[in-house]
Image (cartoon, rainbow, N blue to C red):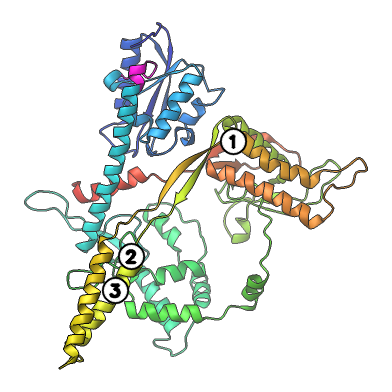
Amino acid sequence: MAASASGDRWVVYVRLSRDTDESTSIERQTEEGRRWVEDVTHGVVVAVVVDTDVSGEVSPWKRKHLAEWLEPLPPKPFDGMVALRVDRWARRVVWFSSLMDWCRDNGKRINTVRMNIDPSTREGRMFAGIAAMFAENELEVIKERAQETRDTLRQMGRWPGGRVPYGRVKVHLGKDEVTGKSKGWRLDDHPHRCSVVRRAADNILGTYSGMQSTPHAEVRRLNNEGEPTESDCRLIDDGKEAKGTKWLRETLVRILLNPTTAGVITDHEGRIVRGDDGLPVMIARPIITLDEQDQLRALIESTPQSETQRVRTEKPRRKNTGPLSYVQHCHECGGTMYRDGSTEAGSDGYRRRLRYRCPARSKGLDCPGVNIVADPVEKWAGEEFLRRHGHMAYILEEHVPGVSYASDIKAAESALDELEADRRAGIYKGAAVDRFRTQHRSLTERLERLHSLPTREATTVLKDTGRTVATEWNRHNELILRSTAVNEKGEFIVDDPEERKVLRERGEQGHNGLYRMFRIRVEVKRAAVKGSRSFDPGRLVFTYQAEEDPEAAALEAIAQEEATD
């Protein structure tokens, strides 16, 4: 290893895509990291940083625990960081390169136990870059393999994994007698929840009473009967306590029109999977048939809006969301806090009547109803955010749309199916047979041509804006300052009150976008003294939202196919 003095301080970094992964467990990574520090560098380990359930595809600066050590003031002084392999640092070349640049700019060393790659040397940087490319390629192979596995399972009528739909349960098919491998899973009816779906569908269709209900009426009935919602059912199935959430019209409609409710399954593009016979592959017993779903869809779309909904559609209500909307949460119940109240400033400059409130009590939940004054908590959160992330480069994710001919292929296939059905029904006879052959040949050639056309999946590319996060923050902050700026006479520079409001909202929405980009989460605790109006920063906890892990999802899908019980 290059130039390492005895007594250097090292941070051992451990990352797991899944907490149950035994091949690179926390203990194994930690032990090898400590041994490397002691035997190779003769240094000391100042900390072991562990990020579990985090994909290598996630930026190091967005990982809950590693991000703390990449700040200007880390929890402890250190000279270098070491991980088991390059893929523990990142599975994207862009993130690993950014991490190496940060270490070089901040005088830190970064290393790996396996292969002993030292990016402080020219050769080490070259080998590290090659290893990072292999790690990124491995991630893509995992994703492709997982997708192929899911497609194969769908075609076989087996459950490919993921969240089990409402009304269904997952049933294991056992093991193969020859290979001993798992046969996978299938979906079966939940003894009670499928009857909930069936009853709601029958009421809306008017199957038995002749009187058609509406989704709104069914939602009220389910709430009055105390029927657990879809999210509460998942908590119950996991052995957790239900939160008592209420049914919503959108939730019920989504369940009723879900293809799995009709016993069929769709592919990753949303198309119904069909077998060699052209018929939909059945993955479970239909709770509602596809024809009934078409009837429900027509009834739901034709249901007139209520008077209140029409008013909101014609004149949408302006929501006073605030920069911490969907970012600030109640520490007691975990619910999202909303900003409401007056925007008029008091004698001390704070808009005392403008507060963030937890609406749990109004929903009948067991929560003391935490609330806090808006202005000081917004100021505190902004300062904390800039302290942690202001120095970072402002990188945008740019969506590149894909190219797909799925809709054209589906239309051609439907036309071909109808043509062949008419032929079997005897419609084409005599001279009309030639017309059938011409149409059939034309459709077949069109399908072959569409299938041969190149397609491209939608992707997201990273675009460096050349600005820091602090610069972007200040750009939005200028709009807020402009909305409150006054001249020598104490008059607002922007005369129109509506324009001032729009300027402030645009600035606050920009701050909110930055918070949500970095998945910031601010939790508010109860005040030490009930009814206290003074601002206490000790009530606030600055943390991060949980992040979806695509690598873990891919591994889970493969495990369901190959792993044994």
Q: Considering only vertical position in the picture, is 67 above or below 399?
A: above
The residue closer to the viewer here, 138 or 79, is 138
Magenta region, residue range: 117-125
Where residue 407 is drawn, which disc sits there?
none
Residue 15 point in image, percent of width and height: 37, 32
Reading the image, the residue beneath label 2 is 406
For residue 433, say whether it is visible.
Answer: yes
Sooner in the amino-acid sequence: mark 1 or mark 2: 2
Does the magenta-highlighted stretch encompass residue 121? yes
| 145 with respect to 464 (left or right) | left
Reading the image, the residue beneath label 1 is 469
Tell me the amino acid under the disc marked 2: Ala
**What whole-number distance in Å separates the C-alpha atoms at marks 1 and 2?**
40 Å
Residue occupying image coordinates x 63% and y 52%: 358
Residue 116 point in image, percent of width and height: 30, 18
Quarter holding the N terminus?
top left
| 462 with respect to 380 (left or right) | left
Instruction: Check disc 2 and report its element: helix, strand or loop.
Output: helix
Residue 427 point in image, percent of width and height: 21, 92
Reading the image, the residue beneath label 3 is 412
Does the magenta-highlighted stretch encompass residue 391? no
Residue occupying image coordinates x 26% and y 63%: 451
Tell me the amino acid under the disc marked 1: Val
Other residues around mark 2 within 10 Å, as few (<14) / some (14–19) / many (≥20): some
Instruction: Check disc 3 and report its element: helix, strand or loop.
Output: helix
The residue closer to the viewer here, 119 or 255, is 119
Q: Nearer the viewer, mark 1 or mark 2?
A: 2
**What whole-number distance in Å separates the C-alpha atoms at marks 1 and 3?**
49 Å
Q: Considering only vertical position in the picture, is 79 above or below 345?
A: above
